[in-house]
Amino acid sequence: MSNLDALYQEIILEHNRRPRNYRVMEGADRVVKGHNPLCGDALTLWLKLEGDRVIDASFQGSGCAISRASASMMTEAVKGKTRPEAEALFTRVHDLVTGKLDVDADPAAKKTLGSLRALGGVARFPIRVKCASMAWHALRSALGSDESSTNGASEISEEP
Ligand code: ZN
């Protein structure tokens, strides 16, 4: 394991131990459930919006360390972002965890992702990709840009 891998693993473990924004939100504008049947991960995501901007995000759920860490990092990253910014971040993270994005070759992506780069390790483990992407799919669904789930409940069925 390289030093970078060790650092990324530490970030994941730390978010799993102390997930950020882990609470039920009263008066949320959006509530969406995410589910990853492959691993048994499940979460509920709450968003508060002001116009086009996410002003608060929280989650609760059960699942593996990667799913919890990813949800924790997502809620931190998305706060203050507009819908298009959140959408762009979803795309970056999705490309990262599915191995389509080489952050070292893309300085702009590297800067945008920041510590979210820690999630990139799952690209080498296809079975974990959905663990890392579940919270992000829930975010997309909550922002109304995922047309496959307009009823507020999302089933994650995309192939990694
Ligand atoms: Zn999982």
Image (spheres, helix red, strand yellow):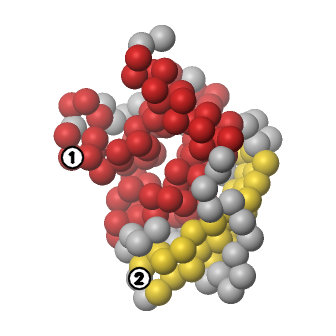
Q: Is residue 41 left or right of residue 136?
A: right
Is disc 1 in contact with disc 2, using a CB cutoff of under 8 Å? no
Which residue shows up at 68% across the image and 86% down it?
Answer: 27
Q: Is residue 3 left or right of residue 156?
A: left
Q: Name which quarter of the figure residue 52 lies in.
A: bottom left
Separation of residues labelled 1 and 2 (CA atoms): 24 Å
Q: Amino acid at mark 2?
A: Asp
Q: How many numbered marks appear?
A: 2
Which residue shows up at 28% across the image and 41% down it?
Answer: 110
> Dot 2: within a 10 Å radius of its alpha carbon, few (fewer than 14), some, or many (20 or more) residues?
few
Which residue shows up at 29% across the image and 34% down it?
Answer: 103
Indicate the secondary structure of the residue bearing disc 1. helix
Does residue 51 lie above or below 147 as drawn? Answer: below
Across and down, in percent, residue 153 comes to 72, 67
- Residue 36: in sight, yes or no? yes
Which residue shows up at 48% across the image and 11% down it?
Answer: 1
**Mark 2 lies within 8 Å of ligand 1 (Cβ measured):** no
For the C terminus, give its image quadrant: top right
Does residue 121 lie above or below 30 as drawn? Answer: above
Residue 108 image label: 1
Across and down, in percent, residue 63 comes to 76, 42
Q: Nearer the viewer, residue 94 or 22?
A: 22
Q: Amino acid at mark 1?
A: Ala
Across and down, in percent, residue 143 comes to 52, 72
